[in-house]
Amino acid sequence: MIETRGLTKTFGSTVALDRVSFRVGRGEVVGFLGPNAAGKTTAMRILAGCLYPDRGTAVLSGFDVLAEPREVQRRVGYLPENAPLYDTMEVGGFLEFSAGLRGLRGAARRRAAGRAGEVCALEEVQGRAIGTLSRGYRQRVALAQALVHSPEILILDEPTTGLDPHQIVEVRELIGRLKSERTVIFSTHILSEVEAVCGRVLIINRGRIVAEGSPSELRSRARGGMLIAFRLRAPEAQTRERLERLTGVRRLIDLRADPDGYLTGRLEADPAAGVSEQIYRLAAEAGWGLSELRSEPARLEEVFINLTRDSGRGAAKSSE
């Protein structure tokens, strides 16, 4: 449904996108993940036909954004980071207005507005002015305008920015309901959004795609090691020193005393070094109490930091 090849965009001397290529299949929910000023918004604007690349191509539903922008826009629903709302308009009237901009007329326009309002749970506020709504409802209205013409592809730029935890959950659930009917790509820098909603992730940094795959694939690929969590009853200074000297230990990530007098922590280790067995033997020999010893997957936060810390050197940051 979406295929980009070598997308490049500069603003003066600033490189916003640097030869970006990726594909999104029908029915996928893909997270476009990156730190602020990574190039996410520039890519979203190009996919939505609001901005042209300097080089490269983007094809959506078989249509090229450069050669056939109107055909692309007919098939795309776009929610920019700053929602396009008119505060003095009533919700129902705004959705009919949005449907009219999409070329719908008469009864078809009214049906489309009603359907989008129902999908986004706006029935209770249809007659209210948009300017009187909470941030959560305003975001729902903005999402409804992106859905009003039943697009094949949804492009959502930071759809949960500024929402409280309850509102974030509502938007997540809505995206989850939409994925059976549409292809969805949304940008975010919030890692929990990716894990909660996406089947696949594209990580962008300094205008370049630095990794892609499912959250679990990225965790395993980015680290190349394993994490071991432990809980010991032992003296802290001696424990730290002896754990760091074990064969295959890369680093001790954290070590702290809990209220029960145990030391809890995690360490990063080479998978083939048998570090868990070494810890077990060390505890037995030293007479330490060992109440927990387990391996755990790398957290997506750690993967993200590893992938975006040093990648893309030499590329200027985007103008997002």
Image: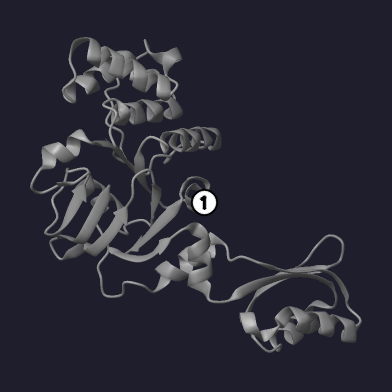
Q: Residue at x 74, y 78 (%)?
A: 276
Q: Is residue 313 left or right of residue 233?
A: left
Residue 176 pos. (x, y %): 47, 37
The residue positioned farthest toward the left in the image shown: 67
**For this rendering, which residue is in front, 95 or 310?**
95
Residue 267 pos. (x, y %): 66, 75
Q: Which residue is drawn at 71% across and 87% down?
A: 246
How many numbered discs, if any? 1
**For this rendering, which residue is in front, 256 or 124?**
124
Q: In this view, does 284 lie to the left or right of 85?
A: right
Q: Which colour scheme is used?
A: one colour
- Label 1, residues with CA under 10 Å away: few <14, some 14-19, many ≥20: some
**For this rendering, which residue is in front, 250 or 86?**
250
Residue 129 pos. (x, y %): 34, 15
Which residue type carries mark 1?
Glu
Q: Would you identify the image quadrant in which residue 136 lies?
A: top left
- Please, what secondary structure does the residue beneath circle 1 have? helix
Q: Is residue 255 visible?
A: no
177 up-or-down from 240: above or below: above
315 up-or-down from 132: above or below: below
Q: Can residue 176 be seen in this view?
A: yes
Q: Which residue is drawn at 12% across and 37% down?
A: 70
Q: Residue at x 52, y 73 (%)?
A: 223
22 up-or-down from 90: above or below: below
Q: In this view, does 195 lie to the left or right of 229?
A: left
Q: Would you identify the image quadrant in which residue 39 lies?
A: bottom left
92 up-or-down from 78: above or below: above
Residue 229 pos. (x, y %): 71, 69
The residue positioned farthest toward the right in the image shown: 287
The residue labelled by disc 1 is: 195
